[in-house]
């Protein structure tokens, strides 16, 4: 919380602060609960450069201390920790009225320092992997992709294998229009205030895989560009009606190729400004930047970095030559120049794309990005981790996250991967449809939390009503204090701890609260299976394919970074502090050196077994 920064201000700066207060025009509203930040004052602006956090809890604690002090002086408290009324006077008038000296003065400066900096709270939706199937029908159209595929799956759980598909979809099918409409209505009704924008990370149409009724052979069909464009037009119109006052920012997915960039730019011109269009027309990547905010959003076209054998680009480019060079369509040069410019202008960055780096958490380590581009992306993020506030991707259809580490093994950045709207994941098993709502500080881009919404597809089909509900809130669900690379590193570390239920919770959320009945087909043995926990741990923390394989091949529970874990380092620090404390106490009591050794032996013994466990678990990575 950087509590030393205020006291470390030079005396000239502190004097300037007091002179600023003497102008008697700094009416400072009190902080209210739930991160409601007060309006900027001149003093706040003066101090804002010394803090990047807003700690309302500390402010309220300081208020209670000040109230007790004033009460001891038989004065009526001019402000309250429980009331949201504004201060009834200026800072200077409070100093003058109560004359309580340095403590009140420092308290007021701390209050303004912590509460008056970052601006308002905003929200944004993240939707991904819709995979719209216009041929879906409840009576099972024999010509539809879904019907042919669903009736030829072997070993499908009986609970999911139903001859008649439901109104809102089927776990073996892509998304019907009824499900898409229900998702749009849910976003509009669940949270229609404070929405800054919507992230739409691609994969719009159904998977192009057909299993014939009389053969096990798989054939791939290429959809015409005109039909793809019509699907995108339908979804664009729906989102435009849903978010009349917000911008929807699209990123191209692997199923969205085949429509020219010129056609797409015309389709989305109501959302993308001209400066974004300039690069979008080049190859589908762009930035969104508001001069009034201190962050920008970078939208990548990850299709340019995928393996041609995996991403089906070769037959979908509508005459465009696929660039297989070191820098396809100049996206790397552009990306790095955008980050360089953001650093120069002291702006934070969101990175948005469809296909994330790393491997699939539900398909035995399947990778999609080209190995060279995967490695380069990780290196670019490492070099710019201090200005990157978040990375948002889709593609895998599952609810998961990734942690990126520095070259020395320290967690430096994180990726959130949102679950799909489609309930179907070819090769990876089904999931319930999901929507995600993020909460962030608009002034800094700091991501504070998110709420994951879901639709129980079986219940919706049974009731004939799509009731989207909150599945969980990130911080509360995983008992986190904040969203940082370190906190998510520690969460991944908890996957391997048998006494922690973090992996059980993660495993349930991974398929959006859909119970997996046949783990031999869709899963890795269940949430209590050590190999399963290891598999998911490795996908979260090893974003290089070779490192993932090495991690998964190990038979010990690994830790989430190279070297000693953060927990072990913390225990070592505790040992040192306890020893120094014992030494100080014994010296005060004029006790002998032998007493110091005896006390130290008792205290260190408490941690002996814990340390041995951590050291044993750490050896795997040396």
Image: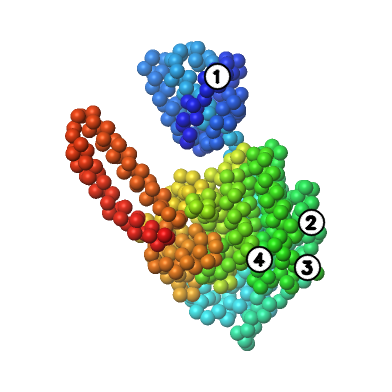
Residue 359: percent from left, percent from top: 55, 65
Identify the residue shown where x is 80% and y is 60%: 263
Callouts 1 and 3 close, C-beta under 8 Å: no
Q: CA distance from mark 4 to mark 3?
A: 15 Å
Q: CA distance from mark 1 to mark 3?
A: 63 Å
Residue 483: percent from left, percent from top: 51, 47
Identify the residue shown where x is 60% and y is 35%: 119
* Left or right of 436, for residue 71: left
What is the residue that sits farthest to the bottom in this orientation?
214
Residue 561: percent from left, percent from top: 46, 55
Secondary structure found at label 3:
loop
Callouts 2 and 3 close, C-beta under 8 Å: no
- Which residue bears the numbered disc 2? 281
Number of the front mark, 2 or 1: 1
Q: CA distance from mark 1 to mark 4?
A: 56 Å
* Left or right of 381, for residue 325: right
Secondary structure found at label 2:
helix
- Which residue bears the numbered disc 3? 321
Q: Nearer the viewer, residue 284 or 38?
A: 284
- Which residue bears the numbered disc 4? 306
Identify the residue shown where x is 59% and y is 56%: 378
Check disc 3: other Cα within 10 Å, few if <14, some if 14-19, many if 20+. few
Q: Earlier in the sequence, mark 2 or mark 1?
A: 1
- Which residue bears the numbered disc 1? 12
């Amino acid at each position: 919380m950087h509590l030393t920064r205020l006291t470390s201000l030079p005396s000239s700066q502190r004097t300037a602060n007091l002179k600023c207060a003497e102008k008697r025009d700094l009416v400072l509203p009190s902080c209210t609960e739930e991160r409601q930040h007060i309006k900027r004052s001149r003093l706040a602006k003066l101090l804002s450069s010394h803090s990047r956090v807003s700690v309302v809890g500390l402010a309220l604690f300081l208020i209670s201390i000040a109230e007790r002090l004033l009460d001891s002086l038989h004065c009526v408290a001019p402000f309250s920790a429980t009331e949201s009324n504004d201060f009834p006077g200026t800072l200077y008038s409070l100093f003058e009225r109560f004359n309580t000296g340095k403590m009140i003065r420092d308290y007021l400066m701390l209050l303004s320092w912590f509460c008056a900096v970052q601006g308002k709270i905003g929200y944004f939706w993240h939707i991904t992997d819709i995979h719209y199937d216009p041929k879906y029908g409840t009576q099972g159209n024999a010509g539809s992709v879904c019907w042919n595929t669903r009736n030829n799956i072997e070993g499908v759980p009986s609970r999911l294998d139903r001859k008649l598909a439901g109104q809102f979809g089927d776990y073996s099918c892509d998304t019907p229009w009824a499900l898409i409409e229900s998702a749009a209505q849910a976003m509009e009704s669940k949270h229609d205030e404070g929405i800054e924008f919507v992230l739409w990370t691609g994969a719009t149409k159904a998977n192009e895989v057909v299993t014939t009724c009389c053969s096990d052979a798989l054939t791939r069909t290429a959809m015409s560009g005109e039909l793809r464009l019509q699907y995108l037009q339908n979804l664009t119109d729906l989102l435009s009606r849903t978010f009349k006052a917000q911008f929807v920012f699209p990123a191209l997915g692997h199923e969205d190729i085949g429509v020219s960039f010129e056609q797409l730019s015309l389709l989305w011109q109501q959302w993308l400004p001209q400066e974004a269009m300039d690069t979008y027309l080049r190859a589908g990547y762009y930035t969104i930047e508001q001069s009034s905010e201190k962050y920008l959003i970078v939208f990548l076209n990850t299709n340019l970095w995928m393996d041609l054998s995996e991403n089906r680009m070769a037959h979908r480019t509508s005459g465009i030559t696929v660039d297989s060079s070191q820098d396809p369509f100049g996206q790397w040069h552009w990306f790095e120049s955008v980050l360089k410019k953001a650093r120069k202008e002291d702006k934070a960055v969101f990175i948005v794309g469809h296909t994330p780096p790393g491997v699939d958490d539900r398909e035995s380590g399947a990778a999609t990005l080209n190995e060279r581009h995967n490695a380069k992306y990780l290196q670019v993020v490492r070099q710019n981790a201090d200005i990157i506030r978040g990375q948002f991707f889709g593609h895998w259809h599952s609810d998961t996250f990734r942690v990126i580490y520095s070259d020395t093994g320290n967690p430096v950045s994180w990726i959130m991967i949102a679950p799909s709207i489609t309930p179907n994941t070819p090769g990876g098993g089904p999931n319930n449809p999901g929507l995600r709502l993020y909460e962030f500080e608009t002034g800094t881009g700091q991501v504070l939390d998110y709420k994951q919404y879901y639709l129980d597809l079986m219940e919706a089909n049974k009731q004939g009503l799509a009731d989207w509900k909150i599945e969980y809130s990130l911080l509360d669900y995983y008992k986190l204090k904040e969203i940082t690379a370190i906190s998510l590193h520690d969460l991944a570390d908890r996957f391997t701890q048998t006494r922690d239920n973090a992996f059980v919770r993660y495993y349930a959320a991974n398929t959006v609260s859909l119970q997996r009945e046949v783990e031999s087909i869709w899963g890795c043995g269940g949430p209590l299976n050590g190999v399963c926990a290891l598999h998911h741990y490795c996908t979260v923390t090893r974003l290089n394919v070779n490192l993932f394989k090495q991690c998964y091949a190990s038979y010990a529970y690994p830790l989430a970074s190279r070297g000693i874990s953060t927990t072990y380092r913390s225990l070592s620090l505790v040992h040192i502090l306890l020893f120094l404390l014992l030494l100080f106490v014994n010296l005060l009591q004029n006790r002998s050196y032998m007493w110091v050794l005896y006390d130290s032996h008792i205290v260190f013994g408490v941690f002996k077994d814990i340390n041995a466990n951590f050291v044993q678990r750490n050896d795997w990575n040396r």
